[in-house]
Image (cartoon, rainbow, N blue to C red):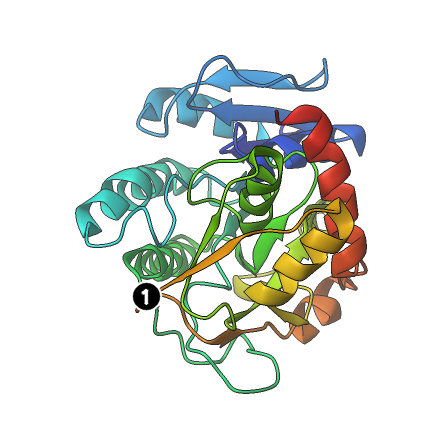
Amino acid sequence: MRNNILVLGASGFVGRRLVAALSEGGHGVIALARRTPAPAYPAKVDVVTASLDNSTLIDGLLATCKAVFHVASDSTPGTSASQPTLEAGLNLLPTLRFLESLQKFPQVPLVYLSSGGAIYQSIESGGLTETSRAEPPSYYGAGKIAIETFINAFACQHSGRALILRPSNFYGPGQYFRRGFGLLPTLFRHVVNKTPLSIWGDGKIVRDYLFIDDFLVLCLAIADSNFAFSGFEVCNVGSGKGHSINQVCTLVEEITGTTLERIYLPSRSVDLKRIVLDNKKTKQLFGWEATTVLPAGIAQSWNWFKNHAQ
């Protein structure tokens, strides 16, 4: 019977939390992770350690699944800067191989985690919509747009169903420090180690920060709706509010009771001035909107980090 949800990228921050949320929500889950050992999951989750290159294995898993969440990604705008082939090898080619398997099961809907923070051009005010111009300044963002385009082609050619989620910048409990991944755990790391913080530019660039628990509420709503979308859809997923790096640093200082030594470096071309997302379409389709304000989310994240990520 097709009663499982397959989660690709189950060993990452989003994947770990998503697997647990879906399982606790009563869904059968298969967690596919490339890295071993896999993190601890609820006992009833089926854990498979493999890559997307194993097409025979992927075909067998898809035969048991009612849907797929693809949240796997192994790069950031910084890690693949000046290395387009790295982006292709880490993310684009594995996803294309997966699509070759998925096209044998076009009745299985796909939810793909793209990026709302790395594909749009900056705007001075208001929120970016799904129809805003996508002109990514990084190879990371270009890779996301390329994958979205291939998924759209898959849906058109094979009458498949696909939902693209474009989230803003994730943060929250469960997010360990990893160089180049996530502003909040990076700030927490500097707080714990009492080390200077390097900031590219003047710290005034504005971003939209999305609390992981809010995102999981959306994923559960999508799953509980029995993946009630048709054809090819694209949805922004963010808080709808913007904060500068300097503002986030000040909030972290207030919450942790520590002063961060800030060192400002020359700005980078990949860092756009202001990216804030408009979520009206996501609310219309799934009745979702973010509810966690940034200070409360940072406080919860810090309480987890200081006890788990030493």
Report the amino acid beneath label 1.
Arg
Quarter containing the C terminus: top right
**Can residue 67 be seen from the camera position used here?**
no
Q: Nearer the viewer, residue 193 or 310?
A: 193
- Height in image: 38 above or below 199? above
The residue sitting at 54% across, 52% down in the picture is: 261
Left-right relation of 182 to 99: right
Within-10-Å neighbours for mark 1: few <14, some 14–19, many 20+: few
The picture places residue 40, in percent across and down from the top left corner, at 64, 16
The picture places residue 278, in percent across and down from the top left corner, at 63, 75
The residue sitting at 60% across, 79% down in the picture is: 127
Quarter containing the N terminus: top right
The picture places residue 77, in percent across and down from the top left corner, at 36, 54
- Height in image: 105 above or below 131? above
The residue sitting at 59% across, 51% down in the picture is: 260
The residue sitting at 40% across, 60% down in the picture is: 152
Residue bearing the label numbered 1: 268
Left-right relation of 167 to 197: right
The picture places residue 231, in percent across and down from the top left corner, at 52, 62
**Can residue 88 be seen from the camera position used here?**
yes
Circle 1: element type? loop
Q: Nearer the viewer, residue 75 or 180?
A: 180
Quadrant of the image occupied by residue 305:
top right
Left-right relation of 22 to 91: right
